[in-house]
Structure formats: structure tokens, C-alpha cells
């Protein structure tokens, strides 16, 4: 926004010049009796009046300057009953043209009635998941495409913020490791988002949901490592191929969704934050996220960097190795926090097998386990500067999978 950068200086009042009274030609000017006392009083009154007028003028100009400076930009004003035409004119439109970043919005716009028809009027039988502020339904679009429809609760400004962030980011970001965004509905107070349908649900369900485990096959070691690589590539894209980088800020096993071949994609960008494009750049913001996944420096100071996501990825990697939740109050106190319990075992080659998910029944390679444990240990270090960048994590996992043995090794304790 352009503003008047010229400061308003002190305006000094100058006494008005004294001119003789006008006279008609051929007539003598009238005689005015001279009184020194009256003349002094007139000068003082004139000075005071001039100073008062100058002060009023200065205050008026300063007020107009402040009013102009504080007036909101039209690009950020939206209609409360629906998204304005300037929906996408937010911070992400100023992203530099990086790899895989689209410069145009390709999202479809749906009416609320279309979303009702797609989900069978949001019937319970189509409910896929239920969160603290949203519900996800299975739906079928008019073109016959199967989709997932997220219905956000009407909880005020924070819902609009998250909704806008998701639409704004996913309309522009295109990667095979991010959940494909189809379109949105902003019909009056309704806020809905339509995504591609991921038939195998979330990674969290496969690792921790008892009901889900009873009806689904357990994830084997090879599949877990492929999921880890896909998720790492998704974060690498956000951190390294977009400028300024995007920090997910709530990367958990809940947001990793699995396709029909157990390919993994990252979802849920409502809390995402634009990072600094400077080396090791940071932003300071309100602490948001899920307990057990939040990096210590972010939790304590609000300092947020891409390394905060790296820490969260390390926690997810520990979940894949151990099958344990990040925080589990049902376990003994010394085992209730996954990072604290696992950290001493990660770098101990003689004991690292003790942390492996018992449901794997020893069907994994010890060599691969040690390599993955080292990656996890680096990611969950308490000092952010010592954590790797996601490109290094991806390269390590690619190397591991490239040499992965398809003949499972059994470990005998």
C-alpha cells in the first residue's frame, strides 16, 4: 500500500504583513490616533490566533494521514456471506514461480445444494471421519467421480481462516504427494472442501485404531517404508520447491492418507504457515498443533521453521517403527511419551530391536531398521539446527528402499 512518507513538520506561525489602509485618489488618508499599548495587544492576539490555526491544521493533516494509512486494502476484504472475487489475493499469490507451483486457480466452485446431492444430504452412512471442527463424508460428484467432502463447523473467524488457507494453498500446489484438491463451497455460511477420495484412510487408523485393525491388513515393513518416503517427499516439496517455503505446522499420522496401493499423500493445510525464504529463516506465531508432534522450540517460544515439520516427521517415523502413539497415557509413565522412551534405543544397535512393533513378528531387515532409526534420531533432536532438511531425509530413504531386500529377515531375540 502506498502511503505519504513525508513527515508533517512543526508549522511555525508567521505574523501577517502590515499594509497601510487603502485610500481613494486625491484624498488624504485618515488620521488614526497612535496608542502603543493597543498596538502591542493587537500583535499578541494575531500571533495567538495564527498559532491556534496552525495547530488545528497540523492535527487535521495528521489525522487524514493516519486514516489513509490504516484503511484496509480492498484485496483482503471478503463478504461474510460468501467468498469475494478476491479470495485468492492473499499472501500465497506472491509466491515465486517455483517448480510445480501453478499460477492460476483450478478449483471448482460448488453450491451447497450440489454438496448435499453428492453426499446424500450428509447421511451418516457416508461419514468417513469426524474431527473436533469438521466432518468428512464420502461423495459422488455430478461427473461420477468419487470424492471426500469435508464440512467445516461454523465456529467463527478461525474456520474462515483455515478454509481460506486450504483453498488458497491447494489451488496452487500440485504434487503427487499432496492430496488433490477438487473444489470448494462457500455458499452463505457453509464452508465445504472437496478432495480426491483415498480409500485406505489415514495412517493413524492403520497403526492405532483397534476397530480399523480388525478389518484391515496390517502394514508390513516394506509398506511402512514406502509410506515414509512418500510423506517425506510431500514435505520436501513444501519446503524446497516452493518459495517462500510452506510449513505444514500440524504434520501427524492423521494427515497422511493412503490410496488404493497404499501410496501416501499429505492433507489438512488449515494451519499451514508461510515460512521465511531466508536461510534458516523463522517466523514467530501462536503455538498450534497436536500434542506429541510439536517441536520443542516451537512449543516453548513460538519459533516456527521448516525444521519444526522435520521434528514432526521424525515422530511419525517412530510411529511406523514402533506402532506406538506419540502420547499414550495408558502406558507406564516412562513409556508414555514416544520420543522420550525411544530416543535412548535409536542409537543403540544392540537394543534397537526392542522398540520395533511386535505385530511385525520380526519380518524386517536389521540393517534397514538401524538405518531408519538413525534417520528418526536425527529428525527428533531437541536442537532444530542439528536436524536434517527434508531433501537429505528423502535421499536417505530412497537409498534404503533401493537396496531393500525383498526377502524378509527374522530377528531372533
Image: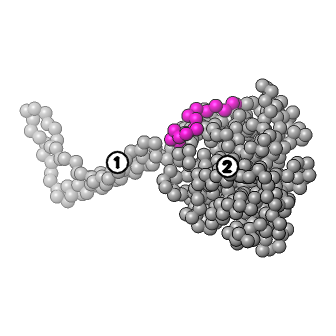
The number of numbered discs placed on residues in the rendered structure image is 2
Name above or below for residue 340 compared with residue 35: below
Q: Position of residue 393 (x, y in %)?
A: 62, 55
Residue at image location 68% in from the left, 69% down from the top: 347
* Magenta region: 95-109
Q: What mark, if any, has residue 402 been given in the picture? A: 2
**Disc 1 element:** loop
Question: Is 143 part of what is drawn in magenta?
Answer: no
Q: Residues within 10 Å of mark 1 (few under 14, many from 20)?
A: few
Q: Residues within 10 Å of mark 2 (few under 14, many from 20)?
A: few
Between 238 and 159, the one nearer to me in the picture = 238
Which numbered disc, 1 or 2, marks the residue closer to the eye? 2
Name above or below for residue 148 compared with residue 221: above
Between 224 and 12, the one nearer to me in the picture = 224
User: Mark 1 vs mark 2: which is more N-terminal?
Assistant: 1
> Magenta stretch mostly in which secondary structure?
loop
**Could you tell whether 394 is left or right of 142 in the image?**
left
Q: Quadrant of residue 149?
A: top right
Q: What mark, if any, has residue 35 been given in the picture? A: none
Q: Position of residue 331 (x, y in %)?
A: 83, 69
Between 51 and 205, the one nearer to me in the picture = 205
Distance from Cα at disc 1 to Cα at disc 2: 63 Å
Reading the image, the residue beneath label 1 is 6
Question: Is 98 part of what is drawn in magenta?
Answer: yes
**Disc 2 element:** helix
Amino acid at each position: 500500500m502506498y502511503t505519504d512518507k513525508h513527515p508533517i513538520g512543526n508549522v511555525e506561525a508567521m505574523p501577517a504583513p502590515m499594509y497601510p489602509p487603502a485610500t481613494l485618489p486625491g484624498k488624504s488618508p485618515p488620521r488614526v490616533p497612535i496608542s502603543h499599548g493597543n498596538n502591542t495587544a493587537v500583535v499578541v492576539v494575531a500571533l495567538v490566533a495564527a498559532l491556534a490555526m496552525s495547530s488545528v491544521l497540523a492535527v487535521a493533516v495528521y489525522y487524514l494521514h493516519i486514516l489513509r494509512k490504516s484503511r484496509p486494502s480492498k484485496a483482503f476484504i471478503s463478504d461474510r456471506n460468501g467468498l469475494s472475487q478476491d479470495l485468492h489475493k492473499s499472501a500465497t499469490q506472491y509466491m515465486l514461480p517455483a517448480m510445480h507451483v501453478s499460477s492460476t486457480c483450478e478449483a471448482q466452485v460448488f453450491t451447497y445444494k450440489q454438496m448435499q446431492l453428492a453426499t446424500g444430504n450428509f447421511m451418516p452412512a457416508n461419514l468417513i471421519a469426524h474431527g473436533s471442527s469438521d466432518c468428512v463424508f464420502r461423495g459422488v460428484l455430478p461427473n461420477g467421480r468419487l470424492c471426500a467432502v469435508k464440512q467445516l463447523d461454523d465456529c467463527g473467524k478461525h474456520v474462515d481462516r483455515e478454509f481460506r488457507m486450504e483453498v488458497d494453498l491447494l489451488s496452487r500446489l500440485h504434487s503427487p504427494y499432496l492430496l488433490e484438491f477438487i473444489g470448494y463451497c462457500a455458499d452463505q455460511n457453509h464452508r465445504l472442501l472437496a478432495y480426491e477420495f483415498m480409500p485406505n484412510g489415514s495412517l493413524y487408523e492403520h497403526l492405532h485404531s483397534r476397530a480399523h485393525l480388525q478389518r484391515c491388513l496390517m502394514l508390513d515393513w516394506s509398506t511402512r517404508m514406502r509410506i515414509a518416503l512418500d510423506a517425506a517427499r510431500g514435505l520436501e516439496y513444501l519446503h524446497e520447491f516452493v518459495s517462500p517455503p510452506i510449513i505444514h505446522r500440524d504434520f501427524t499420522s492423521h494427515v497422511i492418507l493412503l490410496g488404493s496401493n497404499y501410496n501416501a499423500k499429505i492433507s489438512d493445510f488449515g494451519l499451514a504457515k508461510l515460512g521465511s525464504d531466508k536461510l534458516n529463516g523463522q517466523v514467530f506465531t501462536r503455538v498450534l498443533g497436536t500434542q506429541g508432534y510439536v517441536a520443542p522450540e516451537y512449543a516453548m517460544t513460538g519459533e516456527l521453521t521448516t525444521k519444526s515439520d522435520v521434528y514432526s516427521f521424525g515422530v511419525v517415523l517412530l510411529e511406523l517403527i514402533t506402532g506406538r502413539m506419540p502420547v499414550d497415557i495408558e502406558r507406564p509413565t516412562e513409556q508414555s511419551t514416544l520420543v522420550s522412551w525411544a530416543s535412548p534405543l535409536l542409537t543403540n544397535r544392540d537394543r534397537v530391536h526392542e522398540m520395533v512393533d511386535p505385530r511385525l513378528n520380526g519380518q524386517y531387515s536389521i540393517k534397514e531398521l538401524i538405518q531408519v532409526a538413525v534417520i528418526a534420531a536425527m529428525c527428533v533432536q531437541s536442537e532444530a539446527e542439528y536436524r536434517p532438511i527434508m531433501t537429505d531425509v528423502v535421499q536417505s530413504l530412497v537409498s534404503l528402499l533401493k537396496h531393500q531386500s525383498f526377502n524378509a529377515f527374522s530377528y531372533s531375540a
